[in-house]
């Protein structure tokens, strides 16, 4: 293998042909190896990648798009960057796609269906190789854009059994029900549900809470505390104070996100309310730094599995299952 970079005479850039010459293979083999196609022998892939690394080869996105009639980037639409959950998902996606030669371009929808539709229109003009979108709730126009584009698309965080829809996630409803059953098993009978943002996944958790309390004959709509504002510790503290003032017999509060629950723990300390003796406090997502009973969601695993599914679709390979359930885990700590 050559030790000195070869250069294109016209641009001075190391080319695909240079990598092919250094690795002793054809340019098409280099292209397939760097795209991560499974049909290429792993030893050959390693040889090609070593040659590319040694020569400092950087794929030309414009040339690749011209040759394949698609770009070398994948669009990833997430609701919010301030929520660590989606940062974990995006980082896992990026780690999985980069070795296959794909760039990840992020769009932030702010939980707004119109904003998501606009982002989709803008991104599809760039002919992305694939799409990763959060959840299943979107406008009819956005669904039509995805379908008509024929760009491979995988949905994150939720599951769908609809034909032709690819998804990786878990049951938000069952996760909400599981937390409610835990609180009931601990003897709690006045269990409030406190939620912010009120996106589709939060409302599915609410449905799980309603189902379990209804089955136990304990559902009370007055214990639903729903605020469309963004989730935060400050809002959690405020909601907890309101609940305990207006419903003083509440003996547990199930918050739809850990930051709300963390704020509630601080508020309970200020109010002199013992947790969990006087009132249990639980959260959701098991975000970094959480020290309370919560539901651990497989964010990184969802990002990785969705990216791998998308790679298979982009390469025209079969997908074992279009709907992947990665489950969740109830994590019981001292707050309940």
Image (spheres, helix red, strand yellow):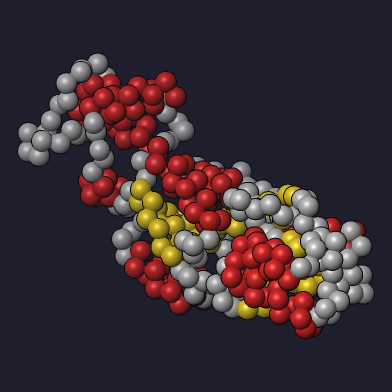
Count of picture labels: 0
| Lateral position of residue 9 relative to residue 160, left or right | left
Answer with left or right where residue 168 lies relative to residue 274: left
The image quadrant of residue 236 is: bottom right
- Quadrant of image for the N terminus: top left
Looking at the rendering, which quadrant does residue 151 occupy? bottom left
The answer to whether 13 is drawn above or below residue 295 in the figure is above
Nearest the viewer among 29 and 214 is 214
Report x, y in % for residue 202: 65, 68
Image: 176 above or below 33:
below
* Left or right of 2 in this view: 80: right
Which residue is found at the position 53% from the left and 56% from the top? 84
Q: Is residue 175 left or right of residue 85?
A: right
| Quarter of the picture holding the C terminus | bottom right
* Residue drawn 43% across the image and 74% down it: 115
- For the point 20% across and 18% down, the residue is 3
Which residue is outermost to the top?
A: 1
User: Is 261 in front, or is 166?
Assistant: 261
Query: Residue sitting at 65 percent across and 61 percent down?
Result: 262
Picture coordinates of residue 319, whole percent (x, y) = 57, 45
Residue 2 or residue 17, whichever sits in front:
2
Q: Position of residue 264 (x, y in %)?
A: 68, 67
Q: Can residue 264 be spotted in the picture?
A: no
Q: Quadrant of residue 136?
A: bottom right
- In this rendering, is residue 277 above or below 19? below
Q: Is residue 60 visible?
A: yes
Can you give x and y, in whole percent of width and height, for residue 222 in the image? Answer: 79, 83
């Amino acid at each position: 293998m050559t030790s000195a970079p070869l250069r294109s005479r016209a641009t001075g850039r190391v080319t695909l042909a240079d990598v092919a010459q250094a690795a002793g293979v054809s340019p098409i083999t280099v292209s397939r190896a760097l795209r991560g196609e499974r049909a290429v022998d792993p030893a050959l892939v390693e040889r090609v990648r070593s040659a590319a690394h040694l020569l400092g080869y950087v794929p030309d996105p414009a040339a690749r798009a011209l040759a394949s009639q698609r770009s070398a980037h994948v669009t990833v639409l997430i609701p919010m960057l301030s929520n660590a959950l989606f940062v974990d998902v995006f980082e896992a996606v990026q780690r999985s796609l980069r070795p296959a030669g794909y760039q990840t371009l992020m769009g932030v929808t702010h939980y707004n269906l119109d904003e998501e539709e606009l982002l989709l229109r803008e991104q599809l003009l760039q002919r992305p190789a694939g799409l990763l979108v959060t959840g299943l709730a979107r406008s009819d126009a956005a669904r039509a854009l995805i379908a008509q584009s024929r760009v491979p698309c995988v949905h994150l965080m939720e599951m769908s059994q609809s034909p032709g829809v690819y998804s990786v996630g878990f049951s938000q409803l069952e996760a909400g029900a599981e937390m409610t059953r835990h609180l009931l098993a601990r003897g709690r009978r006045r269990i409030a549900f406190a939620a912010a943002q009120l996106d589709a996944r939060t409302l599915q958790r609410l449905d799980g809470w309603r189902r379990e309390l209804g089955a136990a004959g304990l559902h009370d709509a007055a214990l639903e505390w729903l605020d469309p504002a963004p989730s935060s510790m400050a809002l959690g503290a405020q909601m907890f104070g309101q609940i305990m003032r207006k419903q003083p017999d509440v003996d547990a509060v199930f918050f739809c996100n850990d930051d709300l629950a963390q704020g509630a723990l601080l508020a309970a300390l200020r109010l002199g309310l013992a947790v969990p003796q006087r009132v249990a406090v639980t959260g959701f997502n098991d975000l970094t730094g959480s020290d309370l009973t919560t539901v651990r969601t497989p964010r990184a695993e969802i990002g990785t599995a969705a990216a791998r599914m998308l790679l298979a679709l982009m390469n025209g390979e079969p997908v074992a299952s279009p709907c992947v359930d990665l489950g969740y885990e109830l994590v019981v700590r001292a707050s309940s």
